[in-house]
Image: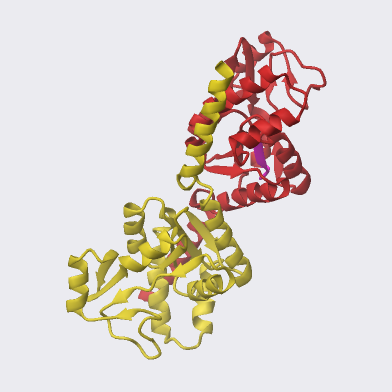
Chain colours: A red, B yellow
Amino acid sequence: MQKGILIVLSGFSGAGKGTLVKKLLQTYDNYALSISMTTRQPRTGERDGREYFFTDKEHFEEKIRENGFIEYANYCGNYYGTPRAYVEEQLAAARDVILEIEIQGALKIKEKFPESLLLFVTPPSAAELERRLVGRGTEAPEIIRKRLARASEESEGMEAYDYIVVNDNLDVCVEELHSLVEAARRAPVRREAFIKEIREELKGFAKGAEQ
Amino acid sequence: MQKGILIVLSGFSGAGKGTLVKKLLQTYDNYALSISMTTRQPRTGERDGREYFFTDKEHFEEKIRENGFIEYANYCGNYYGTPRAYVEEQLAAARDVILEIEIQGALKIKEKFPESLLLFVTPPSAAELERRLVGRGTEAPEIIRKRLARASEESEGMEAYDYIVVNDNLDVCVEELHSLVEAARRAPVRREAFIKEIREELKGFAKGAEQ
């Protein structure tokens, strides 16, 4: 059986990643979502096992020693990591695993798993990004400015991704993301078994032709 | 304006490339087909400017000297080449240009145009390829064996292509090819203008945030 595809989904805060992932999971049954583990405190409304698996430093570091993460990082004194077991189980079961992580994590994944698919979601423009962040009405102007400054930093890494997907219309964007995953399935690196088989078979025919 | 994509379509003889290309051209208006030039004699039923542009050795070699081909080769004493002018005009006009050429030509194109998209079309199996070649009823058994032997050779180069597309059902395969082209449009190398613009815009916002 063909293994699943390891998909990294990144994008500016406000690009709509969360909604896109939810819709992908609802619409297609080939996807599984990896939940990161963190040592930071849950925020209001966050639930263990939904936004993150929340744990303490001791447990996280034990898992690091056991090679229990496919990537992890420390930001502002808190650990964030992608637990290995779930990802490997799902890939082995031919499911395409989505990691919603930021660029440093994405680059680590690409280094360790060159066959992973790196997707970057962006609004159609920076002005639209600002409008969306303001439109939420829940964030202080200072937070919005911080997010835009962070987006500016993140935009420096866009070339590292396999594809840049503009989220202008949710349904269209979901279809685009899905078709990029389907495209990735046709890369030779994921057709190895098929190539090997047809090559052997053709060799047989060619031998027959020589006789 | 975003330039078109240079598409190389290769595949085993009998994989259905000709029909696929025809259908792509009929169904979508973003494609243009490059016609190769050759010094070989036209076969029965072939028309100048449809299968090939037929010319003589002298004219072909003059065009080589004028850098008039984006790639050319000599097989069995005959030249085959892709005229440069048409390809460049069409790409500049944002049309995606299809070159239906074999693997050596494909590799030359990829070397000169790293952003080109290399697609390899194959039947679902070697047995099916043989069935199709036999089913045509027009080829002598010896020709069929030669084609299978040639397919066996060509299969060694499949990994050089960006995508391997199985042609099991014509309409499905046309959609697949088209979606691979659409996917390619989302690679960062073809989003340069967009990336540059959003980056500049975000930088402006980030500066505003610092003040």
- Residue B55 x/y as whole percent: 26, 81
Residue A15 image point, x, y percent: 66, 35
At 69% from the left and 14% from the top, the residue drawn is A39
What span is colored magenta in the figure?
A93-98
Against A206, is B47 above or below?
A: below
The C terminus of chain B, quarter of image? top right
Residue in the image at 66% along x and 14% along y = A60
> Is A1 placed left or right of A135 in the picture?
left
The answer, for residue A123, to whether it is visible in the render is yes
Quarter holding residue A138: top right
Depth order, front residue of B168/B192: B192
Quadrant in which residue A35 is drawn: top right
The question of residue A207 being in magenta is answered with no
Front-lying residue, B130 or B196: B196
At x 59% / y 15%, what residue is drawn?
A: A75
Q: Is residue A105 visible?
A: no
- Which residue is outermost to the bottom? B44
A97 in magenta:
yes
Q: How many numbered marks, from 0 up? A: 0
Residue at left offset 63%, top offset 39%: A123
Q: Nearer the viewer, residue B142 or A103?
A: A103
x then y, percent, for residue B189:
45, 45
Pinpoint residue B13: horizontal percent, then vertical percent: 44, 73
Q: Is the residue A26 above or below the residue B91 in the image?
A: above
* Residue A117 position (above or below residue B114): above
